[in-house]
Amino acid sequence: MAGFLLGLDIGSSSVKASLVAIDSGQTVVSAQSPAEEMEMIADQSGWAEQDPEMWWEHAIKSIQLCLSKTVAKSESIKAIGVAYQMHGLVAVDKNGKPVRPSIIWCDSRAVEYGDEAFKELGAEYCLSHFLNSPGNFTASKLKWVKENEPEVYKRIHKIMLPGDYIAFKLTGEIATTDTGLSEGIFWDYKQEGIADSLLKHYGIDRSLLADIKPVFSEQGKLTSKAAKETGLKEGTIISYRAGDQPNNAFSLNVLNPGETAATAGTSGVIYSVTDQNAYDSKSRVNTFIHVSNEANLKRNGVLLCVNGTGILNSWLRKNLKSGTLLDYQQMNEQAASVPIGAVGLSILPFGNGAERILENKSIQSSWHGLDFNRHTQAHIFRAAQEGIVFALKYGFEILQTMGIQSSVIRAGKTNMFLSPVFRQAFVNTIGVPLQLYDTDGAKGAALGAGVGAGIYSDFSEAFQGLNKLHEEWPEAATVKSYDEAYSQWKEILMNEI
């Protein structure tokens, strides 16, 4: 079929839009807004908020930029898909207006509420029913609002996830998915429905939740207002939505048990698919419904997340400079100029809120072994990239204790995977081959829209244009060097926690 699919990826740094040609499955044009990074509000330590209207503003701009870069007409766009930053809380009134800024994924204010629920409901109950501690997820964030902003809470008509909100702005319909509810810990895997026991414990009315629609389905049509704002055609269908990590896995054709995806943007993630209701006894990694789940074909995604990944690299870029602001390529080149282990310098990259792999502790980022006579900016750059990988390795070991194995890890050739130093550290520390593909979240959302609209008959047809760009394998001598550096780093971490 001739024509295009539009994918939106609503991140915490920017909003990206991509047009994908239906026939080839290839991205024709992409755009993002803003050019740098969106504002994040942090009024208190551990807080992180964003204005949902800001996401919509940049969604409009990214769509318009996409359309301006191509001769494609809006009439040729057959379906729209939405990927989004997970776990955020968007609360709206009866007019669909946000009653407060969104409490986003890396905000850690609700930890104590999740911990209390885990204790009161019982660890065994929570893990067997929710596969997670309520932790710092969306349900607990809503509980925080209820307890700390009661007048705001009274105004809430519906709560949504960030992608639900963008879909609402496009269609005027408030809806969500079972995958979305599972990522908010609103899902009971034993009951295969809404987690009523947690809602009851938190005193939250079930009516605040949006209606459920299948991940791959017609979820609404573009309104005349949204069409006028974006330049798209009224009536265009929205036929896919998913959180960024399940969507990233989908974009890499990671759909079945044993397949694993990774990202290294603001946060770093390793995401493995399983056919089991698997969980970690300490809820340090988290299980959610995967996009490919079906009634008779269980598919869950087990996610380990390190909050302080690209945000650490970005912080270094902005704050370590000699007269002019370095670009990431220059930072990577400097990092490559010093040896593995950065001559004894170690960085713990945990400066972006409470970390789930550390049992929701917030230990902050710290540097260890800094020698003023030996270490340079280059050593700091390398130690940061290795520290991020070592944090992912720490989480990967948790996955392995759950019996989850990976024969290969797939990622998009983007963000920190553009760095040769990061790739080398990742492959040889994790000990698994790495494959990089020409895909990203916006492209995945577009292909998902094609499946949801019935334009593609199945997943294999949707991924006809997925091309492998690069592959790296562990090397015995290099693995040994990284094992030594990781052991030193892990010892420092154990002392901190």
Image (spheres, rainbow, N blue to C red):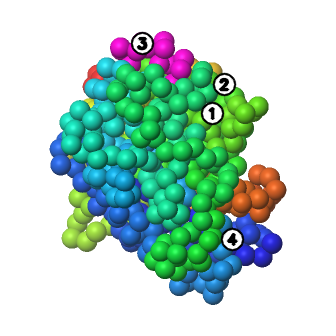
Label 1 or label 4, whichever comes before in sequence order: 4
Residue 247 is situated, as x and y percent measured from the top left of the image, at: 59, 50
Residue 424 is situated, as x and y percent measured from the top left of the image, at: 54, 47
Q: Spatial distance from mark 2 to mark 4, Cα to Cα? A: 35 Å
- Above or below 2: residue 281: above
Residue name at image x 45 percent, y 21 percent: 197
Label 3 or label 4, whichever comes before in sequence order: 4
Most extreme residue toward the bottom, as rendered?
Answer: 71
Dots 3, 4 in contact, CB < 8 A: no
Of discs 1 and 4, which sits in the foreground? Answer: 4
Q: Is residue 71 left or right of residue 122?
A: right
Q: Which residue is mark 2?
A: 276
- Which label was assigned to residue 122? 3
Q: Residues within 10 Å of mark 1 (few under 14, many from 20)?
A: many
Label 2 or label 1, whichever comes before in sequence order: 2
Could you tell me how many numbered marks the image carries? 4
Q: Which residue is mark 4?
A: 78
Dots 1, 3 in contact, CB < 8 A: no
- Above or below 223: residue 123: above
- Above or below 251: residue 223: below
Dots 1, 4 in contact, CB < 8 A: no
Magenta residues, as a range? 118-130
Label 3 or label 2, whichever comes before in sequence order: 3
Of discs 3 and 2, which sits in the foreground? Answer: 3
Asked whether the viewer can see residue 257, the reply is no
Label 1 or label 3, whichever comes before in sequence order: 3
Residue 143 on the magenta segment: no
Q: Amino acid at mark 2?
A: Gln
Q: Quadrant of the N terminus?
A: bottom right
Q: Which residue is mark 1?
A: 300
Q: Quadrant of the C terminus?
A: top left
